[in-house]
Amino acid sequence: MAEGRGSVVAATAVLCLLVVAFQCEVSQAATFVVGDKNGWMFNLSGWPTGKNFKAGDVLVFNYPKGAHNVVAVNKAGYDGCSASPSNAKVYSTGADRIKLVKGLNNFICTIPGHCDSGMKIQVMAS
């Protein structure tokens, strides 16, 4: 009987360690509001400066619904202010939450004239 209780205690301990490890991993992700209190707007290219982003962190893009959008694009799309590739993901809720991937993450607004007027950001995530 004592052997059975020891196995249960050991299994419980392992389970507890796994739960703690999982919670630590989940708690590592941070949430950043793009543009801080001003939200997603023009001339934010410097907003990421000084911030440390990691893959899995979440960017929140707040803006008046219908006034803007957020499109995750590749570098060519960012540089050319175009939704490239054509299947680029478009967000338009006004409170978009986008999880960063490792490497360079590029976002633009595709409302005509907005990206060309500086409504775009690049975020490097480690």
Image (cartoon, grey):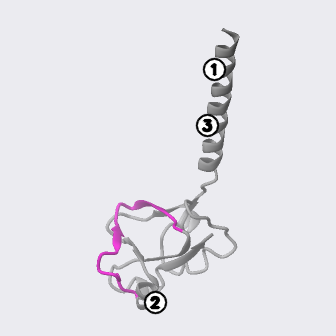
Q: Quadrant of residue 13?
A: top right
Q: Which mark is residue 19?
A: 3
Q: What residue is rendered at 46% in x and 89% in y? A: 79
Q: Is residue 67 above or below residue 82?
A: above
- Mark 3 residue element: helix
Q: CA distance from mark 1 to mark 3?
A: 16 Å
Category of crowding for the residue at label 3, using alpha-carbon neighbours closer than 10 angstroms: few (below 14), some (14–19), many (at least 20): few
Q: What residue is rendered at 52% in x and 65% in y? A: 100
Do the residues bearing badges 2 and 1 touch, measured as CB atoms within 8 Å?
Answer: no
Category of crowding for the residue at label 1, using alpha-carbon neighbours closer than 10 angstroms: few (below 14), some (14–19), many (at least 20): few
Along the line of sight, which residue is nearer the eye, 98 or 116?
Answer: 98
Q: What residue is rendered at 43% in x and 88% in y? A: 76
Q: Amino acid at mark 3?
A: Val
How many numbered circles does the render carry?
3
Q: Which residues are magenta?
A: 81-101
Image quarter in which the C terminus is found: bottom right
Labels 2, 3: front one: 3
Q: Quadrant of residue 66?
A: bottom left
Q: Main secondary structure of the magenta part?
A: loop
Label 2 sits on residue: 79
Q: What residue is rendered at 43% in x and 81% in y? A: 74
Label 1 sits on residue: 8
- Mark 1 residue element: helix
Mark 2 or mark 3: whose residue is earlier in sequence: 3
